[in-house]
Image (cartoon, coloured by chain):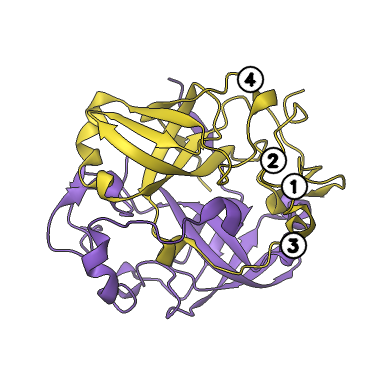
Chain colours: A purple, B yellow
Amino acid sequence: MESVILKPIGVIRSPFTDVKSMPIQPVSENSAAGRIEIFPEFAAGLTDVEGFSHVILLYHFHRSQTYSLSVTPYLDTEPRGLFATRAPNRPNPIGLSLVRLVRIEGSHLHVENIDVLDGTPLLDIKPHVPEFDCAPGARIGWLEKAAADMRTKVADDRFHR
Amino acid sequence: MESVILKPIGVIRSPFTDVKSMPIQPVSENSAAGRIEIFPEFAAGLTDVEGFSHVILLYHFHRSQTYSLSVTPYLDTEPRGLFATRAPNRPNPIGLSLVRLVRIEGSHLHVENIDVLDGTPLLDIKPHVPEFDCAPGARIGWLEKAAADMRTKVADDRFHR
């Protein structure tokens, strides 16, 4: 199958300049503020976005160099299949994060609950629609037992050796 | 910023060979069954995935040729900013769908609630974790008034002229 060539549409600014201190995912206890800087040529696409309280960011895990199909996640001590994790080192290193949209100023989105490294290339923004994106009560496999830790653990450097 | 080059890790099989009859997103009333065929070299990454009742598919909108920053969505009659919609024609044509995982057989995932065109190149599979991916009660902007239609409308061909 053909390769897919993507070009960043902006850059993500966050307080996280070092992967070691990053939250794992933007859970409720993480209120970190960030700024999504869309390149000006795409700004017209932001019309109507402010009506949504949350948006999904797709971005390039630009520090990812390689991957393994078996990884030991931050939230566990046992190796797990890569596709059962949100680890950044993947065959296609695309990250997905839900963030809270605070406001839009020109081509900049001010957001909260960000868990993305400062300087990360942005690939897409999609409106978050619970009807499409949520399965309340979903089973979460190996994460069930880690759920209690989920809110407080921060990343270490295991994926960035 | 540098381009990102992705290679499909599999292909999505669905009943939808024609965009005209497709559901818009995999909402609850859409129980369409599909099969995600991971290429054998990635199958080891599926370990532990079966513990999750829902997975997120990232895929290439391979029929997308161009885009406009203002689109009239299926669910509306007014033009909206592209990033306030889930339209397939985007600067980076990556699709995102939540599907219900029924079972895994070897390198094939049997899923339900699929809204993806048959033959679509798969880019990534991520476990769906409500804690990460859901904002219950999120405001959904222009979609509020379309919400009542959301479950029953099917796509037409407006993005594939």
Which residue: 26% across, 64% down? A144
For label 3, the SS is loop
Q: What is the quadrant of residue B61 in the picture?
A: top right
Q: Are marks 1 and 4 in contact (CB under 8 Å)?
A: no
Q: Are marks 1 and 2 in contact (CB under 8 Å)?
A: yes
- What kind of residue is marked 1? Asp
Which residue: 76% across, 66% down? A106
Q: Which residue is mark 1?
A: B149
- What kind of residue is marked 2? Thr
Q: Nearer the viewer, residue B140 or A158?
A: B140
- What kind of residue is marked 3? Gly
Q: Which residue is mark 2?
A: B152
Inter-mark Cα distance, 1 to 4? 21 Å
Labels 3 and 2 in the same subunit: yes
Looking at the image, residue B41 lies above or below residue A140: above
Where residue B116 appears, as percent x and y from the top left, is: 54, 31
Label 4 marks a residue whose chain is B
Check disc 4: other Cα within 10 Å, few if <14, some if 14-19, many if 20+: few
For label 2, the SS is loop
- What kind of residue is marked 4? Asp
Inter-mark Cα distance, 3 to 4? 29 Å
Mark closer to the observer (2, 4):
2
Does label 1 or label 4 sit earlier along the sequence? 4
